[in-house]
Amino acid sequence: MGTVSLRGIEKSYGTTRVIHGVDLQVNDGEFLVFVGPSGCGKSTILRMIAGLEDITEGVLAIDGQPVNDVPPAHRGTAMVFQNYALYPHMTVAQNMGFALKLAGTPKKEAAQIVGKAAEILRISHLLERKPKALSGGERQRVAIGRAIVRKPVVFLFDEPLSNLDAALRVQMRLELSHLHRELGTTMIYVTHDQVEAMTMGDRIAVFNAGRVEQIGAPLHLYERPANQFVAGFLGSPRMNFLPCEVVGAQANRLNVKVANRLSLTLNAARPTARATTLGVRPEHLDITTMEDGVPARVELLEHLGDVTIGHFRMPDTELLLAAKVDVQHSAALQPGMRVGLMPRAAHCILFDADGRACHGSSPSPSGSGLG
């Protein structure tokens, strides 16, 4: 078993509270990702689970047993750090087996455990090398191997891929996901990279200012964010936010006017006249004529090969909108050109004045036109 339960967890440094009553349940065998901007508290929570930070208030339980006062070595957790933290004078085998040596494990048994972990990570040929002779990806594998040999009930990863180049990060994401499937052990992974969160986690917990804004499956959070913060944090490029005004309502549908020009009919679970913002992702923003959409000027085109990211400025504002344009249609666009932008109503999300999402019961195509 490897369940982790956080109930009312708080953390303060003197009079400054940095974690505000976090409640969280991590299931046995789950790969849960903590994601959020720098300074949001995700690494602090991870260190509290590991026992490296004291808990000011609340109860932390592993497999149902409170561990607030249990030393880190006795919690059944193993942590992989961003900077690898390898001993430079030891070989790979010695680094991986150091915890076993401290525990008094017989040399033969320890060698077998280290050898098995090295096979899983495909670093058996590196066991006699020292860290200075390894690449960044190989050092990270050694750090993971050192955690594996301890046979923890919970793996803790604190931004382990941050020091790797882009191509190696993609490779290591795949390998960590494969490792989770092979071991079946509970893993909690901290990152500020929303791409890592979306591609690796069974569930994602989005942190902001010491609180969990929303937790759920990656696609659920992407498609049905609870609020404007989650909507803007997940997705690359980020979601577009346009000012809007509710001009009519019937049942669970709202008529809104966008940028004082375009009228859209949206599904909304709780119709409210306080709705002030329309959210639309770049893949749901179409290019049309100025007469048929929100007028905008082409500012920049980023050609990525399979798709072009267009950046558009609305007139008389500093608001920039991003749209994903297929290569065929992007060839007709040039910086300075004036176009219209048409949100796909079925995929838009309405946010009220407090930033809360007003989700419809189910997305369906809606009519749209000029108001």
Image: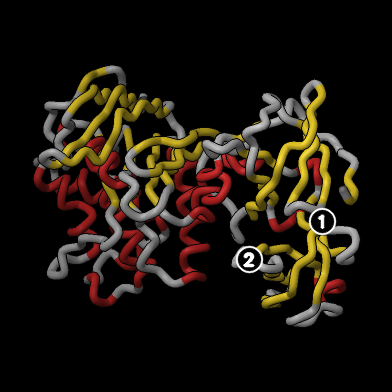
What type is the residue that disc 2 sits on? Thr
The residue at the point 61 percent across, 61 percent down is 237
Q: Nearer the viewer, residue 70 or 268?
A: 268
Residue to which mark 2 is pinned? 317
Position of 83 relative to 52 (above/below): below
SS label for mark 1: strand
* Residue 225 visible in the picture: yes
Residue that protrudes farthest toward the top in the picture: 64
Residue to which mark 1 is pinned? 342
On the image, which quarter does residue 192 sit in? Answer: bottom left
What type is the residue that disc 1 sits on? Met
The residue at the point 72 percent across, 63 percent down is 323
On the image, which quarter does residue 290 sit in? Answer: bottom right
- What's the image's color scheme? secondary structure
* Residue 217 visible in the picture: no
Mark 1 or mark 2, which has the lower sequence index? 2
